[in-house]
Amino acid sequence: MFEKIMKAPNRPALVIALALFAMAAVTYWDASRMAARATYGMNASAASYFVCLFFAVLGLGHVVSAFQAASIEVEDIDMKAIGWVGLALAGLIGSIWLGAGFILGSTLLFAFTARAFGRRAFLVDLVIGALMGLVIFLLFNKLLSLALPQGPLERVLF
Amino acid sequence: MDAINFLIHGFALAIQPSNLIFAAIGVFIGTAVGVLPGIGPALTVALLLPVTFKLDPGGSLIMFAGIYYGGMYGGSTTAILLNTPGESAAVVTALEGNKMARAGRGGPALATAAIGSFVATLIATVGLAFVAPFLVKVAVKFAPWDYFGLMLIAFVTVSATFGSSPLRGLTSLAFGLWLGLMGLDQLTGQARLTFGVPQLLDGVEVTTLAVGLFAIGEALYVAGRHLFKPEKPIPVKGSIWMTKEDWSRSWKPWLRGTAVGFPIGALPAGGAEIPTFLSYTMERKLSRKPEEFGSGAIEGVAGPEAANNASAAGTLVPLLTLGLPTSATAAVMLAGFQQYNIQPGPLLFAQHADLVWGLVASLFIANVMLLVLNLPLVGLWVRLLAIPLPWLYGGILVFAAMGTIAANPSVVELLLLVGFGIVGFLMRRYDYPVAPAVVGLILGPLADNALRRSLQMSLGDPMVFLKHPSSAIMIAIATIALILPFLFKGLAKFRQDED
C-alpha cells in the first residue's frame, strides 16, 4: 500500500517544493552576507531569514501533499500557442533591447499574440498592431509627456 | 454629525466638472473591463497607474474607484448572458442568472442585478462614510505593534482562511513577501536580494507584478487551453423591466446581500467571493420558491449581486482608514495612493480631508452613473463581446507592455514582467491564488517596518507584541485563523480568486 503511493507522487508538487527550497537557500545566502547595523531590535536581514524559514516550511508542506492521495487535476496545454505568446513577448523585449522603438515592439507583440489565439491574417494584424502602437506613442509622448522608448521609426516620423 | 458636513463638502468637490469627467471615465472603463473577459479592475488600475502619474491625484483616485465599482457592475452582464463571469465575484450570479436568460428572462435578471448593485452600493457607501470616521478615531491610537498585528490578520485571511487550499494560498503570499524584500531596506538602506542588479535596488513595482500575473499570466493560460472558442451571448428578449413579482422577490435579497457583503468586505477578510456564496446559500434557504433554484431563481441573482457590490464598498473602509488592502484591486489602489506620496490610513482623513471626502462623494455619483450605464445601455456593453478574442488579448498585452515601459523604460523591467507572467501562468495552471502575492508585495515591507519599529521602541523586547492587549488579541486572531483551516479542512470550501 505504502509502496503504491510512493510510486506515483504528485510530480508538480515535488517540483514546486524543490523550487521553494531553492528560493529559501538563495534568500538565506543573501541574508547571511548582510552586515548587522541595528543597535536595538532586528537587523534588515531578519525579515529575509523569516521568509527563508517560511519557504522551507511551505516546501515541506508541498512534499507532504505530494504523497497524499488527492492530486491536482492538470489539463493538457497547447505548447504551440504558448510558444506564439512567447515569441510575441520576445519580439517586444528584442525591439526595446536593440533600440528599435516602442511602435515596432508593440506591432510584433500584437500580431504574434493574435496568432497565438488562432488568427491567420498575419499581415492585417501587423497593420493593426502598428496603428495601435502609433496611437499610444503619440498619446504618451505628446499628450501625457511620458517618454516611451524611441527607435529609428519614431525618430523619422517625429 | 461630522460625517454629514464632510460629505456635503465632498459633494461640492465631486460635482466640479473635472472630477465628474474622471468619475464618468472611471465607470465607463470599469464597466467595459467588467464585461470583457481576461481583464479585471485590478489589472486595469495597475495599467493606468503610470498613465495617471502626472494627473491630479484626486481625479485619478476618483477614476480608480469608478473602475472598481464599474467592474463589479459589469461582471454580472457576461455572467447572465454568456455564463462566463467577467469577474470572479460574479461566478455565483452566473448560476441562476444564466438559467434565467436561457428561459427568456434575461432582461429581469440584468435589471435585478443592476438595481440590486445600485441599492447595495448606495447603502454600503453610506456605511463607508459613517464607519470610516469612527474607525479613524480608533486607528490614530494604533502603535506600530497594533499595525503589525493587523497586517498579520490580513496576511492570514487573504491567503489561508478562505482559499481553496491554505498551503497554496500561503505559498502565493510567501512569493509576494519575498518580492517585497527586494531592494533597499527602508530603515537601514541595505540592499536585499538585488543580486547586484542596479535596477532591482528600487524594489519590485506593484504595477509590474500585477500586470505580469494578471495580464500576461492570463493570456498564456487562455491561449494554452484554447479557452477562446467564441460563445454567442443569449439575446435579451422581451421587456428588460421587472414584473411586480420580480420586485417583491428581489428587494429583500438586495438588503440581505448588502448586510452580508459590506461587513465582510470591511473586515480584513478579503474578497468579494465569500459574501456572494454566503448570500446565495442564504437566499436558497429563505426563498419562498426554493424549487426554482438551479433553474433560474431571481433571488439567486439579486442577493449575490448586491453582496459583491456592497463588499467592494466595504473593502474601501480598511483601505482608506488603515491603509490595509484586502483584495487585489484594493492593493493596486493602495499603490495608486502611494504614487502620489499619499499614505492611506488615519492621517489621510486629517491631512487630505478634501481628497477623501471628495472621493467618497464621487462614489455616490459614480453609482448613479453606473445605474444609467447598465440598465438602459446594457445592449451596448453586450456588443463589446463581439471583439474577436485574438485582438482583445493582443490589445491587452500591448497595453500591459505600455504600462510597464512607461513606468520604467528598461529591459530588466520587461524581463521581470515576462517572468511574473510565467509565474502567473503556472499559478493558474496549478490552482494557486494570485491575489495573496500582490497583497504580500505591498504589505510585506510595511509589516517589516512595523515589526522593527516596535522592537526599536521596546529596545528589542519581543514581548512588546503580547504586553499590549490590542496587538496580543490581533496576533491571537491571526494565529487562530491560520490554524483553523488546517484543523477543519471542510471549512475551506470557499474559493477565493483575484477580483
Image (spheres, coloured by chain):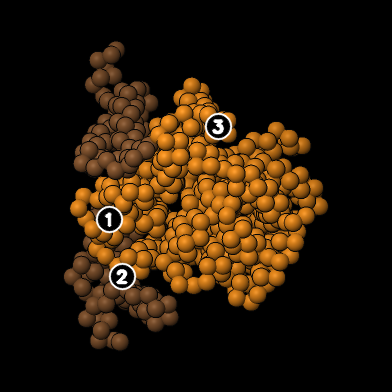
Chain colours: A brown, B orange
Q: Is residue A135 or residue B450 the one in the foreground?
A: B450
Three-letter amino acid code at the position of disc 2 = Ser
Left or right for B196, reference B368: left
Asked whether the residues under marks 2 and 1 belong to the same chain, the reply is no
CA–CA distance in space, label 2 to label 3: 55 Å
Three-letter amino acid code at the position of disc 1 = Leu
Asked whether the residues under marks 1 and 3 belong to the same chain, the reply is yes
- Residue B493: percent from the left, percent from the top? 52, 32
- Residue B491: percent from the left, percent from the top? 53, 28
Left or right for B8, reference A138: right
- Residue A129: percent from the left, percent from the top? 33, 73
What residue does disc 2 label?
Answer: A106
Residue drawn at point x = 61 percent, y = 72 percent: B19
What residue does disc 1 label?
Answer: B200
What residue does disc 3 label?
Answer: B468
Q: What secondary structure is found at the residue carrying circle 2?
A: helix
Residue drawn at point x = 42 percent, y = 40 percent: B456
Q: Nearer the viewer, mark 1 or mark 3?
A: 3
